[in-house]
Every structure is written in C-alpha cells, then in structure tokens.
Image (tube, grey):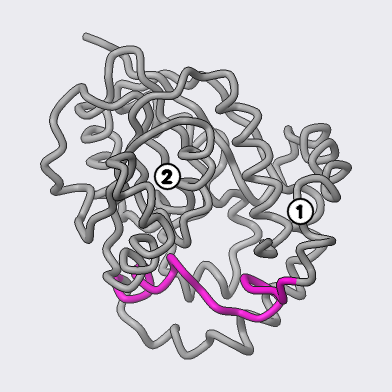
Amino acid sequence: MKALPPGTILQLTYLRERLQKLKPGLFLEIGPGSGEISSLLLTLGWRGKAYDLEPSTVEHLRVRFAKEIQEGRYTVNVEDYLTSNTQSSTVDLIISCMVMEHLDDTLEPIFMQRSHDFIKPAGIMIGFVPSSPSHWGIEDDIAGHCRRYTRDSLQKLISGNRWQTHHMTGLTYPISNVLLPLSNFLVQRSEKSKLDMSEIEKTKASGIRHVKFKTTFPSILSLLLNRWTLTPLHWMQKIFSGSDDALVLYFEARPIVD
C-alpha cells in the first residue's frame, strides 16, 4: 500500500464520506496530480475524465489507470480545462483539488463560469483550496499560488458566478498546522530552486512532487499512515472544522439555473 501524507489522507477520508451520499455518475477532474481522487471516484463507481497541463503527469495517470482506460471508464488528456471542448450540461460532478488558487483574478471567474456550463442542472462542484492567508509560506511560492482563501472570499467567488454554496468546511486542522514548520523546512530544502520558475512552470510542476517525508514516504509507513490509523485525526478535523486557521477549505456548490 502506498503511504500518503497525513493531510492528504484526511482530505480523502472526508471526501469519501461526502461522495457516499451521491449517486455515481460522470465526473470531470481538473488537475488530478498523482490520481488519488480519480482512484477514489473510480472505486466508488464513477466514470470520468481528467485534465492536466503537464504531459508527465498525464503519462503517469495513463499507466496507473490503464485498466480503467481500457474499460472506457476513464480518460485523461493534456489539455487546458479553460479552453477544453467538453459538451455543455453533460457531467454530474466537477472536482478539483488545489487548482483554483493557481488562477489569477482574470482566470478564476472563467473557471467557475465554464464549470457552470459543463455541469448538469442537478450536478455538483467539489473543490479543495488552500486557506488562511496568514499561513502563506514557501510552499505557496514554489507552487505558483495566487492566493489563499478565506471563507468569505470563497463564498463571494461562488455566489458571484451563478453557484450556490451547498457545504463548506475547514479540513486538516490541527495536524497540518502542527506539522507546518517541518513542512516548510522540507520544501525549502528540496524545492527552493522552483522559485526561479515561471508561474506556469510552477503550476505544471505542482501536480506530482517528490519531497521526502513531505509528499513521498517509504511504503512501510503505510502501516501508520492510512485512513484507519488516522481516524482520531479525522474526528478532530471535523470537531475543529470551523477554525479560521484550517489550512484547507472544502466546498460543495450547486449551479443556479437561470
């Protein structure tokens, strides 16, 4: 079993709970990274398509999901979601994790508007974004982030682009906050050279990262880092879901139909 970072496990655990309330259908994932969310969706009976700007990321996913691709349950393309040719009103779920913060103030509403065009009237958008601007750090700089969100700024974005917030909550608090100084140290040591990249290069490189004991772990640690052993931390993140210091915001939104 692959060992994942604690914060990733907590986000996936929460997402699994929420997805189990939905009937599986057709999804679009923007910025799938190493494929953890795609894997969860496919396991739960969804089928869909993923977009990513980085060819090496897409090649990794094509290898990982070769069986699902052959079965016609999954496709992944090197394509810009903002200029993609997806048909209107065809998908049940649009999902992204740590993507929207890469979009500047011009592209951010375009993302929301195109998602509105692609989603079915009864569909849902799910997103994870970095939160708490006061915690801006080296990882935001090397990843090419334009912002960290607050609940108010995220709500304003959603409601201002013909969406209605269905659910919003903070995630990974307090464990990610406790580990943040160590995380910043590891990123500084391993990835500070990325600061010299262009913003688009930073975005492309952010999908799959290799920072030892930050994003990658020896497989043996999966005995400690899994959703069963981290259940107490999952309960804790739900107890403190209202904290403004949570480093991740999770939201669900429904399209407002004219």
Residue 19 drawn at (x, y percent): 55, 28
> What secondary structure characterizes most of the magenta part?
loop
Residue underneath mark 2:
96
Residue 180 is one of the magenta-drawn residues: no
Task: Tell me where the magenta segment starts and ends, as one range.
Answer: 200-219
* Nearer the observer, 222 or 31: 222
Q: To which quarter of the image does residue 145 belong?
A: bottom left
Residue at coordinates 32% horizontally, 44% vertically from top-left? 74
Tag 2: amino acid: Ser
The quadrant in which residue 125 appears is top left
Residue sitting at 47 percent across and 30 percent down? Answer: 45
- In this view, the residue in front, 34 or 126, is 34
Q: Looking at the image, which is closer to me, 174 or 72?
A: 72
The answer to whether residue 108 of the structure is visible from this angle is no
Using the image, determine if residue 158 lies above or below residue 164: below
Q: In the figure, is residue 218 to the left or right of 216? A: right
Decide: few, some or many residues near mark 1? Use Cα within 10 Å; few <14, some 14-19, many ≥20: many
Tags 2 and 1 in contact by the CB under 8 Å rule? no
Q: Amino acid at mark 1?
A: Asn
Mark 2 and mark 1: Cα distance apart in space = 22 Å
Residue 226 circle label:
1
